[in-house]
Amino acid sequence: MLNYLRVKNFLLIKDIELNFSAGLNVFTGETGVGKTVLVNAMKLLSGNLKIKKELLQKENIDIQAVFDIENNEERKEILSKFGFETDELFLRVSSGASGRFKFYVNDIMVKKETYIEIASGILDIHSQHANQSLLDPKNQIKLYDHFIGLDDGLVSYKKEYNDYIKLRSQLDHIVLEKESIQKEYDFIKYQYDEIKKVNPQPGEDEELRKKLTLAKDFYKIEENVSSSINILYDSDNAIITQLKELLNRIETLSEVDPSFKPFADDIRSFEEGSFDLIRSLEKLNRDDISDLDIDNIQNRLSDIEKLFKYGATLDEILKYKEELKEKFSLFDLSQLEIKELKEALVLKRKKVVELALKLRIHRQKNSKKFEEHVERELSKIAMDGVKFEINIKKYDKNEDRYLSSHGIDDIEFVIDTTNRGLFPLNMIASGGELSRIMLVLKELFSNNDTVETLVFDEIDAGIGGETAVFVGEKIRNISKIKQVISITHLHQITKFADKHFKVEKYDEDGTIYSKIASLNKKERIKEIARMLGGDKISPKTIKLAEEIVNSDNNS
């Protein structure tokens, strides 16, 4: 619901602030005072940016509004998508002389596309030349289905339909994967067989290189190991023997002169290191490197190194081998899975079509009653003889492309106002007729439509008398469920107002502006008297206006 609106420097409006009520908010005033300017500001605020730049004033435009969206779950869901969690929505559009707009949501600047998605449809504006939501067949089928009680049936259908779409998506994915694998199957098989034939083990290449080095240096290793052990341990003048003798003598000296103790520690450490060296040499000597076959090692290493085109390391090659194996498995499994999915898809589609046909029957069953109701209501507002129909487009149940989230049919409201045949609503030539049709449909769907605020811009043009009374009653009925903002010339609508605003012109330094004031009861009576009698307000028109304002119909 729209709680507050401020419009500054927009067309004829210099600066106005308005507070709205729930129910019916009516704007009246003489022709040309700028009532429709207010509607254009609302259009801009709700994301309709088709305002001619030459109509904009040089000063900065600033349009702001506050909406109560506590009970509007659909709007809150849209806001949540962009990170806004709130029960109160503040929208703002501003512009400089260049005509480039800036957009704000809850005081945060956002991109134009984001703003349009958030603000679009928050005000459902109807005029002689612009009607919004009900012209779209996608909205028509939603509202009609809700009106005839198809909600539960649609829930069951959509569950089966969504399951069907998921199955179809899975099948499409697997078929694509299979086709992709099939194209490279032979190449994959060649790569996998090549790696499998060599069958390298983790770290094997490093181990082979180490063995090859040992085998090539066998004689050099054997001679040096033997000589080193002999020098350290086995000869008469072995280093270990000499170190022990030296250690004994230095330790004896350190007892006399403690300054020699660090030298004794150094000799002891060197002795321990010598023993570590001896152990390493003996281990190398024990390894049977004499049995290593250089040719076999080189051939095996060559086979492994040929595989490095599949990876920079042996670990990468082995990982690639497993990936190839998975592709083989996928190819084998996909054959079976495709068969099983196709069978499941046939059964699921059968169920979906069965439910879709039930939806079709329910729509057809209720269409005549609905059409007659619309025609009857249209006849009350000077549209007697108009023919209204629901065109249910029944598609072939065997054509998958026709299945959708609402069944296997489309719906479009069509009407004949001139005895020249039935046409979609958006092809009706008369803006006044279209507005009245919208009014009838809005009344029918007022409990089902998620839009909380409706704006009617002079949809009463060209009607009067009893027809005007019916139009006023319909607007009053809608305002009991929705917030309504109506710009009107008819007292038959004005009398139902919960809040009455008057639009007037004034001159400021040679420039004409519009001003808007909220009227009290006395001012309302005077304004309705003007609407009844024009500029010449007599005691009789004042009395009649008082009766209108005080009438029981205004309860």
Image: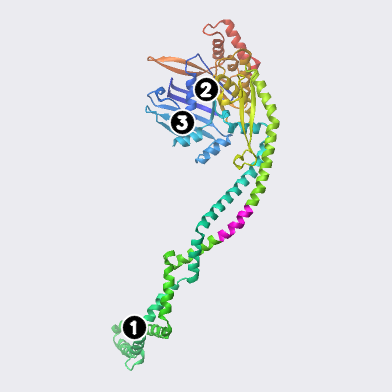
Residue denoted by label 2: 129
Of pointers 3 and 2, the one earlier in the residue sequence: 3
* In this rendering, position of residue 226 left or right of residue 331: left
Q: Spatial distance from mark 3 to mark 2, Cα to Cα? A: 25 Å
Q: Helix, strand or loop at disc 1?
A: helix
Residue denoted by label 1: 270
On screen, residue 202 above or below 12: below
Q: Spatial distance from mark 2 to mark 1, Cα to Cα? A: 105 Å
Q: Magenta segment, which residues?
A: 329-341
Q: Amino acid at mark 1?
A: Phe
Q: Helix, strand or loop at disc 3?
A: strand
**Image quarter hosting the C terminus:** top right
Picture coordinates of residue 266 (x, y %)? 32, 82
Residue denoted by label 3: 92
Number of marks: 3
At label 3, counting other C-alpha atoms closer than 10 Å, the crowd grade (few under 14, some 14-19, many 20 or more) is many
On screen, residue 499 above or below 447: above
At label 1, counting other C-alpha atoms closer than 10 Å, the crowd grade (few under 14, some 14-19, many 20 or more) is some
At label 2, counting other C-alpha atoms closer than 10 Å, the crowd grade (few under 14, some 14-19, many 20 or more) is few
Q: Amino acid at mark 3?
A: Arg
Q: Cβ–Cβ below 8 Å for labels 1 and 3?
A: no
- Location of residue 77 by image quarter: top right
Picture coordinates of residue 324 (x, y %)? 51, 62
- Location of residue 458 by image quarter: top right
Residue 96 is one of the magenta-drawn residues: no
Picture coordinates of residue 312 (x, y %)? 41, 65
Q: Helix, strand or loop at disc 2?
A: loop
